[in-house]
Image (tube, grey):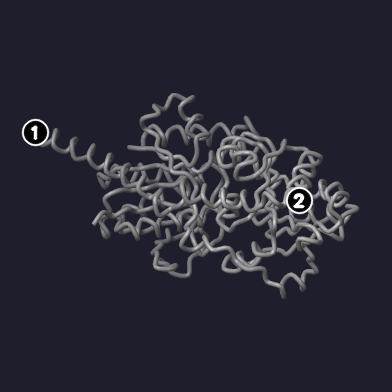
Amino acid sequence: MLRVLHILDHSLPLHSGYTFRTRAIMKAQQAAGIEVRGITGLRQGAAEAPLHDEDGLLFHRTPGLPGGPAGLREWREIAQLARAIEALGRDWLPDVLHAHSPALCGLAALRAGRNLDLPVVYEIRAFWEDAAVGNGTSRAGSLKYRLTRSLENRVVAGADAVVTICQGLRDDLIARGVPGSRITLSPNGVDLALFGTPAPRDAALAAELGLTGTAADGPVVGFIGSFYDYEGLDVLIEAMPALIAHHPGARLLLVGGGPMDSALRARAAASPAAGAIHFTGRVPHREVERWYGLMDIMAYPRKASRLTELVTPLKPLEAMAQGKIVAASAVGGHRELIADGVNGMLFSPDSAAACAAALADLADRRGEWDRLRINGRDHVRARHDWASNVSRYQAVYQTVLDARNRRHRLVAA
């Protein structure tokens, strides 16, 4: 049986798009007959035990916590993770090391892979220098930005194969000089066995929140996720008065939290539509489907930036799988997932007026909702179901293993 060790920045039980994608990959590989484990670096945080079992998935923890001045701290993280990978590799004997961005994981995998004589597959989910800009922790073109980009290029050059989650990232790597033949696409996906049955409307939860989003009263517009500036939730809040002018019963439900939470709540409180905007805070992942059940239209007003142009998000696919209408800004990451008027609606980014007009138009066209829902679910089933997409990894693994075996035969000869 093929054994694959996934090398990760963090994992479950922490909740993020990163950990949910990891879970989906590993569960799909298990179902396909691949033996998998994960190992996390120091940024997972203090671990209660060196081994964590989450839903039948085993995650090993690297001992210790990050420390030291910037620069030195990162090299220490790489060294400690590499040592942990080597120790686990000699004990568990994986066939492939599958490292996931950021570059710190990739560099640790390359170091361990050389010592263990194992091929390394490196998966890029986003360029972390751009993610740091989007999160407000770095500045484009800064020394930190350039160093992170340089490390990414170094890992890509050293890996036996490269995987990206979308065409935008692949095109950017090719523009840097990486041969397209070395890059495989493994798009974001949904485990339809877990997330493919739309939840019924929870009337008690709706009443608790005072939501009246029925066909007669107006749509409930929703967002579920992290509150980062690049998500454009301030644009969505600004759009609400214009939407309510056309549909007085419209409501906005914001589920989640993050760095922009306080600023968004203040903006909402100052809005003429304040009474129609509801914040729930973070909710347990196991309860997310209950909240989807309250929402008619899922809005994703991401702002235009290098991050959002290159990277496809997971949430619109989850919404389509749940049978929800999707309205999203026309940034590159959304255009890879959504065909305007076919499986959702696109509107100009960074424009509250465009956002409001798109939402009002969707609310006016209820007769088309069933078509949009069906097209959305069909799109996810055809292109983004992990049960079928997992085969892309198997082809990559076989390629790098064949290449290693050829090298061994040449050395032996």
Q: Pick whichever, 146 or 226, lies toward us.
A: 226
* Residue that extends furthest to the left in the rendered view of this protein: 413
Q: Residue at x 87, y 61 (%)?
A: 275
Q: Residue at x 34, y 60 (%)?
A: 31
Instruction: Tell me the amino acid under the disc marked 2.
Output: Ala
Locate the C terminus and report the quarter of the image it occupies.
top left
The kind of secondary structure element at disc 2 is helix
Where is residue 193 shown, x and y percent of the image? 46, 62
* In the image: residue 32, left or right of residue 235: left
Q: Earlier in the sequence, mark 2 or mark 1?
A: 2
Where is residue 131 shown, x and y percent of the image? 60, 42
Where is residue 352 shown, x and y percent of the image? 80, 41
Instruction: Tell me the amino acid under the disc marked 1.
Output: Ala
Is residue 136 visible in the rendered image? The answer is: no
Q: Residue tagged by mark 1? A: 413
Q: Residue at x 43, y 43 (%)?
A: 186
Q: Residue tagged by mark 2? A: 363
The kind of secondary structure element at disc 1 is loop
Q: Pick whichever, 157 or 257, lies toward us.
A: 257
Locate the N terminus and report the quarter of the image it occupies.
bottom left
